[in-house]
Amino acid sequence: MKDQKKLKNDQLPVTDILLIFAKKIKLIFLITLFVVVFAIIHSIFIAKPVFKTSAKIMSLGGVSNSNVAGLASQFGIDIPLRQSEPKWSYSEVLKSRPIAETMIKRKYDTKKFGEQLSLMNILTIGDEAYEGSLEILKNKAINNFIKMFSINEDPIKGIYTIKLESFEAILCKEIVTDLIDVLDQHQREYNQSKTSETRKFIEERITATRNDLNNAENKLKDFTKSNRRIENSPLLQLEQQRLDREVSVLTNVYTTLKQQFETTKIEELRESKYVVVIDPPYVPLSRSKPNRKVRVILSGFLGIGLSLVIVFLLDNYNRKNKKEKDKINFLLLLFKKNIL
């Protein structure tokens, strides 16, 4: 009960609290102003500007070799090409080390660091601790580059959105443009490599099929020379039909392989784009971070809240000091009355 009474006595009514804040309105204003000014100075002169751009892309697909396997399989030839047409996951490809290693070799002009600097130098400027080790600097540049951008995939439409942040607007756009170009080149080289393997495989099959066809034709020719009258022999007629059928099948296979061989050679030399740019990257007109307006507004609320807390704590401290002084004065008064 005593503790509850003491707690009630210590509690201030709302009017008293408002009165305290009203008396200290100047201090509240000064503290809030200080916080807002500090936020403005930090946003303009200290905080590093961040610009953001984005691009939307989609893939045209991988190697078009499934037709080769489909047509050849009709004639009893198993061409293992169905799995050579990859389902490209740009989220993984763009974040891969080979792409990053290619990108950090590209050179860019910057207002901050100068012209024609490699992205590796731009991303590692200021890391004096690693200057003695090129490999460590390279790994750091790769990690910093991968952290610069993010990729969002729309699995239904097959569209990928690339978002990248950098300290300069033009640099931001140029990096995304080069990133798409490197991705397209990476996919083209992969497809051309797989197409070359396909062409070599078909070429080997053409040679083997040609030999089989020549042998089958020679067997049919020898059979025809040796058996000129087969009308009265069902067995000889069946044998001739079997040889004719074998020659016909091998002829069809050989023709199909020759057609696909020409198609594959054309595919191998194809130079069209593999990556479709739906929405190209742009030069951002303003920084995305820090947002000065939002910072000033938030700093204003923060300054008001902080100043109210400080005023309340100061008042509480003063009230406690006043109680202690009153106790000391009361003790001195009793001492004077009883002793002196």
Image: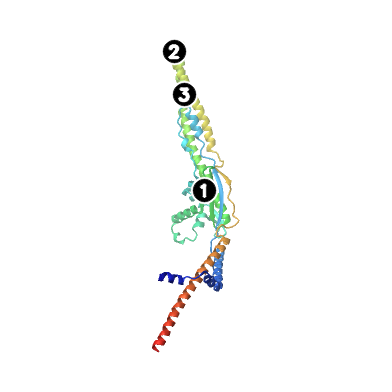
Residue 74 versus residue 5: which sits nearer the camera?
A: 5
Q: Earlier in the sequence, mark 1 or mark 2?
A: 1
Q: Is residue 44 above or below residue 151?
A: below
Q: Are marks 1 and 3 in contact (CB under 8 Å)?
A: no
Quadrant for the C terminus, please.
bottom left
Pointer 2: residues within 10 angstroms few (<14), some, or many (20+)? few
Where does residue 221 sit, x and y in percent of width and height? 47, 18
Instruction: Give the numbered dot on residue 214.
Output: 3
**Mark 1 or 3: the one toward you:** 1
What colouring does the structure picture have?
rainbow
Where does residue 320 sit, x and y in percent of width and height? 45, 75
Q: Which residue sits at x=53%, y=32%?
A: 262
Q: Quadrant of residue 134?
A: bottom left
Q: How many marks?
A: 3
Q: Earlier in the sequence, mark 3 or mark 2?
A: 3
Tell me the distance, in whole angstroms, between the alpha carbons under discs 1 and 2.
70 Å
Where does residue 89 sit, x and y in percent of width and height? 49, 44
Q: Secondary structure at mark 1?
A: strand
Residue 148 versus residue 218: which sits nearer the camera?
A: 148
**Mark 1 or 2: the one toward you:** 1
Q: Is residue 292 above or below residue 273?
A: below
Q: Secondary structure at mark 3?
A: helix
Residue wearing tag 2: 234
Quadrant for the N terminus, please.
bottom left
Identify the residue at the far front of this view: 1
Residue wearing tag 1: 152
Pointer 3: residues within 10 angstroms few (<14), some, or many (20+)? some
Tell me the distance, in whole angstroms, between the alpha carbons under discs 1 and 3.
56 Å
Q: Amino acid at mark 2?
A: Pro
